[in-house]
Amino acid sequence: MTSGGGRQPNGGWLDRPLNDSSRPRKRELALAIRSLCRILRAEDPAKSGEGPPSQAEVAKRLHSNATSLSRFVSPHHPRVPNPRFLEDLHKAASADAAASGQEVGLSLAALQALRASADGEKRGCKGCVELGVRIDSLTHQLSAPCPACTAYQQEREENAAQLAARKGEVTTLRAAIQAMQTTEADLRASLAMAKASRTPLPVPHRQRDRQRSKKEVAVARQLAAQAGDLDSAGKQDAALTILRQGTTELLSPTETALVIVELRQQERDHLADNLIHVYGRDQEDRHVMAVALKLHEEGAADDAGSVLRAALR
């Protein structure tokens, strides 16, 4: 009863205490019946939003009576409903749930299995009780996470993380290669322009030689500077590639010697040593001798000797 003396709210009969543990199977069945009854809606559309219908309305709809229904939803009472009652209840709950866009969440077969277990418990059937215990154990095992599945899922997540990291490394490497190719293309264009503009100006002989020397020095400094930038960025291989291609394909022996001198002045000794070794090993003797002569004229006698020794190996 409410404080105003009126009827108990429609759903109140489904909220009675469930603290009885002497009949665990009946308790499970009572809980299942209550959950299905809560899905039911009143037949009067005006009351459809007020929650479950009254106990009398549910009993009438399920072709039963309020007293029997009260016993079915109580774990204290041993009374177990017949299979037909559970069929009618499940059918009505399924229809109301579908109309509301919901799901019942309990199959009729599972509901009847609960009834059989509760009925065996009432009759003192040892086999039914043991079967119920086994069902509980299996249910617990099924609800527990599978160690093998958990390990497999963890392995998949780790593999996915490793794959993402490798994709990031590949993307970074591709960007670095693209930048190196762009730099190489820019250098080739610059060297080609410099080589095309090396023609001496029509001035007297001494002035012409001075003009040629300035351009040779400028070309050598440009190549050495670009190689130095790559080396400073940690791209030593790219720097060596640019030096090797630039000196063998575009620069004259004199300009090559000036590149070596410029690298020494920049304290890029490892680049200079590699260029001397590769140039002396791969170029014709006359080019090597021309480089050695220019190095000697520039006061780099040690480098002149090194390039000649490289040619003899």
Image (spheres, rainbow, N blue to C red):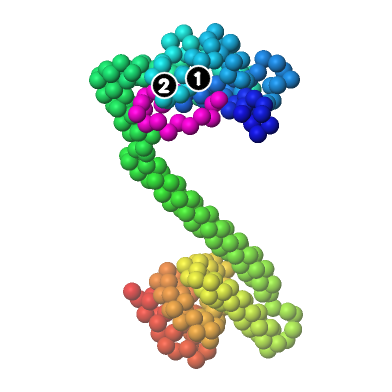
Q: Is residue 63 above or below residue 244?
A: above
Question: Residue, x 64% and y 25% (percent of image)?
Answer: 7
Q: Is residue 84 above or below residue 42?
A: above
Q: Is residue 262 visible?
A: yes
Pointers 1 and 2 in contact (C-beta within 8 Å): yes
Q: Which residue is mark 2?
A: 77
Q: Is residue 276 above or below residue 248?
A: below
Question: Residue, x 58% and y 64% (percent of image)?
Answer: 184
Residue toward you, 57 or 143: 57
Q: Which residue is mark 1?
A: 70
Q: Is residue 183 above or below residue 27?
A: below
Q: Which quadrant is the C terminus positioned in?
A: bottom left
Name the outermost residue toward the left: 126
Residue toward you, 180 or 168: 168
User: Is residue 99 rendered to the left or right of residue 279?
Assistant: right
Amino acid on which disc 2 is placed: His
Q: Which quadrant is the N terminus positioned in?
A: top right
User: Is residue 302 rendered to the left or right of residue 99?
Assistant: left
Question: Residue, x 51% and y 73% (percent of image)?
Answer: 231
Q: Magenta span has 23?
A: yes
Q: Which residues are magenta?
A: 13-30
Pointer 1 local density, CA inside 10 Å: few below 14, some 14–19, many at least 20: some
User: Is residue 191 rendered to the left or right of residue 133?
Assistant: right
Could you tell me how far apart the alpha carbons at marks 1 and 2 are, in whole angstroms? Answer: 9 Å
Residue 213 in percent (x, y) is at 63, 83
